[in-house]
Amino acid sequence: MKQSEIKQLSTAELQDKLGETKKSYADLKMAHAISPLENPIQLRNVRRSVARIATELTKREVQ
């Protein structure tokens, strides 16, 4: 997910998206542990999406 897309979402939507993305990351990580993923770069992309969403939520809490 791009930063511009994240900024357009409301705080509630971001919290939902964060939960979904974290679950997706856990599922990918488990699948990769069992048998290698076809595209292991997916793990990095999903992990970075989690970080982007979490950062935006923190920034909104501070303001």
Image: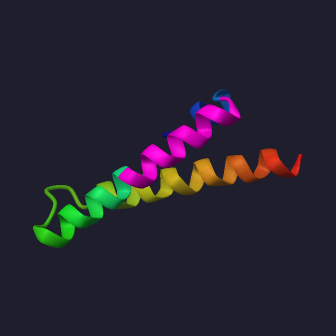
> Was residue 22 drawn as part of the magenta stretch in this picture?
yes
Q: Is residue 50 magenta?
A: no
Picture quarter containing residue 3? top right
- Identify which residue is drawn at 44% across, 48% down: 21
What residue sits 34% from the left and 60% below the top?
26
In x, y percent, where is residue 53?
A: 59, 47
Q: Position of residue 19 (x, y in %)?
A: 49, 48
Q: Quadrant of residue 6?
A: top right
Residue 38, compared with residue 12, is above or below; it is below
Q: Position of residue 17 (x, y in %)?
A: 51, 40
Asked if 39 appears above or below 4 in the picture, the reply is below
Question: Number of labelled discs?
Answer: 0
Residue 5 in sight in this render: yes
Q: Nearer the viewer, residue 15 or 40?
A: 15
Q: Compared to 35, does 57 lie above or below?
A: above
Left/right of residue 23 with respect to residue 30 in the rendered view: right
Segment tinted magenta in the rendering: 10-23
Q: Quadrant of residue 20?
A: top left
Which residue appears at 36% of the width and 57% of the height? 25
